[in-house]
Image: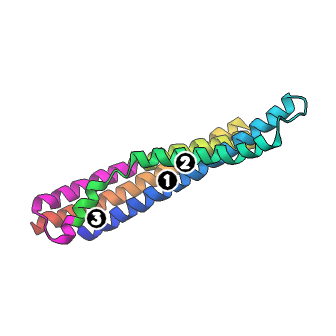
Amino acid sequence: MVQEAEEWYAYLRKKHDDETRTEIVVVALVAFVAVLIGAALSFALVFHTFVNLTYLLIGLVLIPAAAGVATWAIRRRRRFTFAELGSLVAKMKSGQASAEDGLRLADAMHDALLAMKKGKMDSAFTNGVVAFLLVAVFGLNIAVGLLTGAIVYLYFRFEALRDYENESRRYEESKKELLQSL
């Protein structure tokens, strides 16, 4: 049980760090594209005159960088939400844990499992929306975009539910083993 909890905690920690990096890059890229679109529109609307190329270059660097730093600060403020799981794993590994701590560890693993399910369901929706937007904007076809977004959402939702069922089964087996050992 402790080994599984330790692996689970390491997985959640790595996943949180990877999601933070990915979110920072995506937000910075969106800001970069927004600056490019804004510059193109201002160029077209102001009768082919740019205010200053230096301002454009500064905007292409500073605005995405500021967006990335702001995203990092927000993610850092939210923190990693499974600190209790980590402290329980450390306590169990040190051998100073009681039976109550073992049960709390099992409950903390279950809470982490539910949070992971919610996160994957949110990601499925986000992936569906992104697929819709990409196909609708670049493919210039809203109907195909809706269909693509729905298919992507349903696929990732199916995968999230399947993973949840597998991990839930694994959790129940670990809990049974713990209760039998008490």
Q: Residue at x 72, y 45 (%)?
A: 58
Gap in Å between the C-alphas at discs 2 and 3? Answer: 32 Å
Task: Tell me: 164 left or right of 39.
Answer: left
- Give the residue number, with chain letter if any, for mark 1: 20
Say if the magenta span includes residue 32.
no
Q: Residue at x 56, y 50 (%)?
A: 24
Q: Residue at x 82, y 38 (%)?
A: 52
Question: Callout 1, which amino acid?
Answer: Thr
Residue 104 in the image, given as x and y percentages of width and height: 18, 55
Q: Are marks 3 and 1 in contact (CB under 8 Å)?
A: no
Task: Tell me: 37 left or right of 6.
Answer: right
Q: Which residues are magenta?
A: 91-117
Question: Callout 2, which amino acid?
Answer: Val
- Give the residue number, with chain letter if any, for mark 3: 5
Within 10 Å of the Cα at label 3, are there few (<14), some (14-19), or many (20+) other Cα atoms? many
Question: Callout 3, which amino acid?
Answer: Ala
Residue 179 in the image, given as x and y percentages of width and height: 13, 63
Badge number at residue 162: none
Gap in Å between the C-alphas at discs 1 and 2? Answer: 11 Å
Within 10 Å of the Cα at label 2, are there few (<14), some (14-19), or many (20+) other Cα atoms? some
Task: Tell me: 33 left or right of 83.
Answer: right
Instruction: State the SS at label 3.
Output: helix
Residue 105 in the image, given as x and y percentages of width and height: 21, 59
- Give the residue number, with chain letter if any, for mark 2: 69
Q: Upstream in the sequence, badge 3 or badge 1? A: 3
